[in-house]
Image (tube, rainbow, N blue to C red):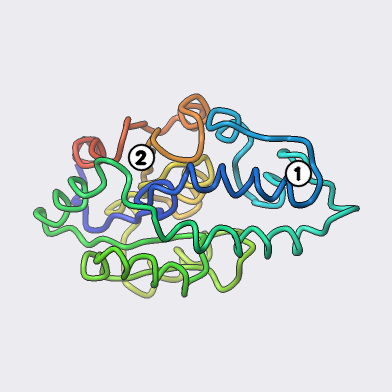
Amino acid sequence: MKQLDVVLWDWNGTLLDDVQVCVDCLNRLMREFGYPQQYDLAGYREVFGFPIQEYYARAGFDFSKDSFETLAARYMELYLPAAERCGLVPGAKQALAAFRAQGIRQVILSASPIETLRRQVAERGLTGSFSELLGLSDIYAKSKVQLGLSWMQKAGIAPENAVMLGDSVHDAEVAAALGVRCILSAAGHQTRAALESTGCPVADTPAGFPALAAQG
């Protein structure tokens, strides 16, 4: 097995337990803009995905009536204060501690705007757990690939010595683009069936990540 030097954590839904908040914000956005659709947790997990614009379309928004930019801006106005009450996903603290005990570098690679990411991590007392926080420069949550590639090159990280830890099909796609292994958690934003379709190992919660990472 190759030496594991770094784990690349996704944030939302993998470490931050914000799934129900996202369901609530989606439903409120639907109501505010006059759409009849309302989602429970299972229905949300079926439609969620990246790119975010495609997820909004699957959820039922009509961009000829309401622009994606308008919807995304209002969503963030709803999400940010609501997310303040979110804790960590069950099992996340155990996984963070296990990797730290092994001396493995931990980095967050997130589609969140970087300032939001820094604030949310700091508010939960986790800044010292990570050697780097990598987030995007706007609210539209496109791709983490270039961000991750640039950081790995700059940091001199060999892809075979890294693993991506996430909760979405997009995380598996990012990992493939980075050339790193990927392990997914079924406790986040997408269904286990969607995650298993990627061929990546799937843990029930982040608590299962260290053991799966050690298997190589």
Q: Which of label 2 and label 1 is nearer to you?
A: 1
At 49% from the left and 57% from the top, the residue drawn is 82
Pick whichever, 137 or 3, lies toward us. 137
Q: Total number of numbered labels?
A: 2
Image quadrant where one finds the N terminus: top left
- Tag 2's secondary structure? strand
Give the residue pinned by disc 1: 57
- Above/below status of 204 relative to 69: above
Judge left or right: residue 137 versus residue 175. right
Residue on which the image places disc 2: 183
Q: Position of residue 16 (x, y in %)?
A: 38, 52
Q: Amino acid at mark 2?
A: Ile
| Location of the C terminus (image quadrant) | top left
Decide if residue 39 is on the left or right side of residue 108.
Answer: right
The front one of 45 and 212 is 45
Task: Name the residue located 75 percent from the left edge and 64 percent from the top edge.
Answer: 69
Residue occupying image coordinates x 39% and y 72%: 118
